[in-house]
Amino acid sequence: MRPVYIGSKRIGTGEIFFVIEEGQANLGNFSKALRMIDYAASCGGDAIEFQLARADDLYVKNHEGYTIYKNREFSENQIIELVDKVREEGMEMIAAPLSHKLITTLVDAGCSAFNINASDLDNPDIIDTVCDSGLPFFLSLPLATEMEIDWVINRIRKKSDDNFVILHGQHTMASGSNGVNIEHTSLGYISTLKEQYQLPIGYIDHTPFKWMPASAVAAGADTISKHLAHSRSERGPDWQVCLEPDEMKEAIDWARRTNQSMRVKNKQLAPGENIDRSQMRRSIVAVKKIKSGEAIKKEDIAFKRPGNGINPSSYERILGKVVKRDVDKDEQISFENLEDN
């Protein structure tokens, strides 16, 4: 599997890449969009994702969605300012273009990568234009069937190299739910996708839980995408699954520490475990008084706590050895008090 680079970060063989999804929480308020970048940076995210659209390319004009998205449009200069602000905060700018006509603008503005939104997984205009941009991108799988996933990946691979990351996940908010139920997250599918497509696989989290990113990392996710809101009380888009800044910071920390654990492939004792070993393991002790000059027999010893003496697994090393001084009942036997007979 070849890693995918987003800016200076490598996805697929290293540390977790955490994308904070702004998800139009700004509702078209540009000042709030800039503040969302500050919130994301304070949480420790690697990148922030903005959904950007042109209403004329997204909805028919007689649909209520047209007016909503028309009021959320940002100008080209505002998009450039967003990208610059993200860079200043040390993050990567991910754009989910809901209009293929915005893609060139985003490339010119210095966008780091794209995300093909789940709603556009079957949209050739978006798919082809993103591929032609030359930038790395994410492919979001919520709403998709396996047949659709295979179709879009085959189309992408005919047009470009494997410079993209697959994001497994689900999206259920339009149905009135408060996010995806845990039993429906299908985290086991992450390993299936890795094996089938030999690509980095992430998880786009539409559950309401701050611990879910860590669970996805434990299931093998290379990157996480999670919604942020300054406050869920504002009831912005997908507010049900958003984390507030303090919660997001904690979620990112858990995800990174879980990732650190998953990269350890050998048995290691945790800090403090040696203290627990000394208390919970056993040592070799005398079951009766052993007088000076006597040789130790198996029936003379037992294995009892604490474990700060000779390890029971070494008992055969002391059998037949002579004690130099008396050993009382329940006293630990020490190598210093033994000599060959």
Image: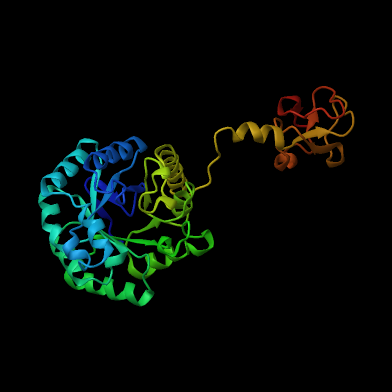
Looking at the picture, tell me which residue is in the foreground, 284 or 106.
106
Q: Residue at x 13, y 61 (%)?
A: 101
Instruction: Answer with left or right where residue 187 lies relative to residue 27.
Output: right
Looking at the picture, tell me which residue is in the foreground, 312 or 305.
305
**Location of residue 157 with respect to 206 vertically, above or below:** below
**Is residue 167 visible to the viewer in this orientation of the structure?**
yes
- The image shows residue 312 at horizontal and vertical percentages of 73, 40
Quarter holding the C terminus is top right
Looking at the picture, tell me which residue is in the foreground, 197 or 241.
241
- The image shows residue 35 at horizontal and vertical percentages of 27, 37
- The image shows residue 238 at horizontal and vertical percentages of 38, 54
Instruction: Answer with left or right where residue 313 lies relative to residue 73.
Output: right
Q: Residue at x 38, y 62 (%)?
A: 168
Q: Quadrant of residue 244?
A: top left
Q: Residue at x 60, y 35 (%)?
A: 273
Q: Quadrant of residue 82?
A: top left
**Location of residue 267 with respect to 97 vertically, above or below:** above
Quarter holding the N terminus is bottom left
